[in-house]
Image (spheres, rainbow, N blue to C red):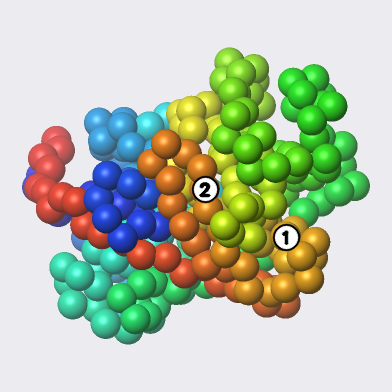
Amino acid sequence: MKLEMFQVDAFTDKVFSGNSAAVVLLDDWLPDAVLQGIALENNLAETAFLKPQGEQWEIRWFTPTEEVPFCGHATLASACALHQRKGIDRAMRFSTRQVGDLVVTPEGGSYRMDIPRFDPDFDIQADALINSMRMDAWLQTFRNRENFFAELASEAEVLAFRPDLPRIAELGSFGFCITARGETSDFVSRYFAPGAGIPEDPVTGSTHATLAPYWAQKLGKMHLSARQLSARGGTLACEVAAERVYLKGDAVIFMDAQIYVP
């Protein structure tokens, strides 16, 4: 079977930066083992699979090791591929299995993505493992439905942080995000999910469903600029609404491909 695939760098305006995602176009769902095999073969943070559903698309995301419930950058990448290679020049709606519909709209050469707002949960204590790593350095810890978060004192501390990946992997499918107020942006972050096959994610759209509301409350503003300080790096513009977060970023196609599966 021959399938059409694209590799897209999301949250960047140039290749070799941002976060790479593969986007695979399907006519119908293949067995999960085949989808997982394709994601493992790609060995990117996420591979997105799209199946047409009337005027919209069903979307699923796989890391090299497992299916995940929510991925922002691979959704942005999917919209970029549909827009630039399939001529879709309207709002694109993607139905998901766990986080509702996501809508991405081409806008002035960039893409505006509508995602759920997941406010930080301060009532549940951070995992003991997170606290044991550098508890004295955390100004605040919180969590959402799939990640733990810690605020550090400065952008320099976020850059200097050296993750203990084997210990973070003990969180299983949960990830760990560190954040601080930015020097040239409103806030910065880094994200680690080795238990899900992602040692450090270059740019993570989904964490901003919680980071943006957190920093909106701290800074008293609903429009924020964000940078992710991975080696590849990426930038996001965030707008916080009552129940949604809107992320705006660029994306560029690195590769058009055909893949062959049994």
Mark 1 residue element = helix
Mark 1 vs mark 2, CA separation in Å: 14 Å
Instruction: Locate residue 98 relative to residue 56 in the image: left or right.
Output: right
In this view of the protein, which residue sits in the foreground, 236 or 31? 236
In this view of the protein, which residue sits in the foreground, 164 or 186? 186
Q: Give the residue drawn at x 11%, y 40%.
A: 260
The residue at the far bottom in this view is 90
Question: What residue is pinned by disc 2?
Answer: 228
Instruction: Locate residue 141 relative to residue 168 in the image: left or right.
Output: right
The image quadrant where one finds the N terminus is top left
Asked if residue 30 can be seen in this view, the reply is no
Question: What residue is pinned by disc 1?
Answer: 215
* Residue type, numbered disc 2: Gln
Q: Where is residue 51 in the image (x, y as percent from the top left)?
A: 30, 62
Residue 259 appears in which quarter of the rendering? top left
Instruction: Locate residue 218 relative to residue 42 in the image: left or right.
Output: right
Q: Where is residue 3 in the image (x, y as percent from the top left)?
A: 14, 50
Asked if residue 216 can be seen in this view, the reply is yes
Q: Give the residue drawn at x 80%, y 61%.
A: 218
Q: Give the residue drawn at x 68%, y 56%.
A: 210
Q: Position of residue 170 (x, y in %)?
A: 64, 20
